[in-house]
Amino acid sequence: MSVLFYIGALLIVIGGICDLFGALGLLKFPNFYVRLHAATVGTIGGAVVPLFGVALLALGADFLPHRYAIAGASFITGIIVLLAAPAGAHALAYAAHKAKLVEWKPKVDHLKEVRE
Amino acid sequence: MSLESQFFLLMKFVIPVYLLAFIIYAVRAFKGPTIVDIILAVDCLSFDVAAFMAILAVYFKSVYLVSGAIILALWAYLLDIYVAKYLVSREVGA
C-alpha cells in the first residue's frame, strides 16, 4: 500500500511546482489573453494534480483516521475543478472580447469575423 | 522511518511553495488592470486554496476540511459565470 503513498507524494510535489510557475506567469505575462494560458497551468496543473495526489496518498497512508472519506472527497473535488475551470475561463474570455475590455494587437480575430 | 514522519518531512518542503504561489496570485488580484484580470486571479486563488485545504486535511487528520474544499471549487465557477453574464449584457464594467 505504500506505493500509493509515494505516487501521491510525487503528484503533490509536481502540483506545487506547477502552481508556482502558473503564479509567476500570471504575474509577468503582458495582457489578459496571454495570462489565461498561465491560469490554465495554475488550475489544472496546480489544483487537479495535487487533489488526485491527496486521494492516492490518503488511500496509501495507514496512520490516517477516516482515510477513505478524505480520499473520496478530494477525488470528487478534483473532478469538479477539472470540469469547472476550463468552462469558467472560456466564459470569461468570451465576456472580455464581447465587452472590448482589453487592449491588444491581434494578427487575426476570428471571433470578430464570425460576429459580422 | 515511518510513513507519517515521511509525510511531515514532505510537507516541510511543499507548504512554503504553495504559500509563495498564494502571495503571487494575491499581488495580481490586487493590482490587476481590468476586472477580468482580478476575477481570473481570484479564481486561480480559490482553486488552489481548495487543493491546499485537501492537503491540510491530511496534515491535521481531519475530515471536515475537505467538505469546505468542494464548496470553494463550486463557488469559484459561480463567480466566473456571473461576472461573464453581467459583462456580456453590458451592465457592469466595459
Image (tube, coloured by chain):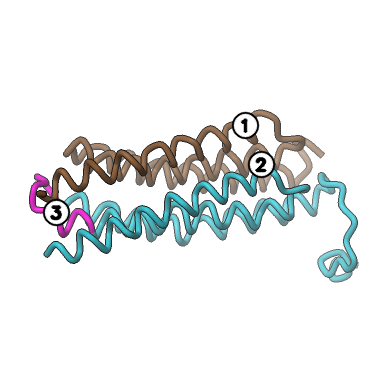
Q: Residue at x 38, y 60 (%)?
A: A79
**Which chain appears cyan?**
A
Mark identifier at residue A62: none
Q: Please tell me whether residue B39 belongs to the stretch shown in magenta.
A: no
Say what amino acid the circle numbered 2 marks.
Leu
**Label 2, label 1: how far apart the Cα atoms are:** 8 Å
Q: Residue at x 22, y 41 (%)?
A: B8
* Farthest residue, direction top: B30
Q: Residue at x 59, y 52 (%)?
A: A39
Q: Position of residue A108 (x, y in %)?
A: 88, 68
The crowd level at tag 3 (other Cα within 10 Å; few <14, some 14-19, many 20+) is many
Q: Are marks 2 and 1 in contact (CB under 8 Å)?
A: yes
Q: Please tell me whether residue A67 belongs to the stretch shown in magenta.
A: yes
- Check the residue under mark 1 and report the chain it is in: B
Residue of label 3: A61
Q: Are marks 1 and 3 in contact (CB under 8 Å)?
A: no
**Label 1, label 3: how far apart the Cα atoms are:** 36 Å
Residue of label 1: B27
Q: Position of residue B89 (x, y in %)?
A: 75, 46
- Which mark is first along the chain, 3 or 2? 2
Residue of label 2: A27
Mark 3 element type: loop
Residue extent of the magenta highlight: A57-68
Residue in the foreground of this view, choosing between A81 and A51 = A51
Side (left or right) of B73 relative to A107 = left
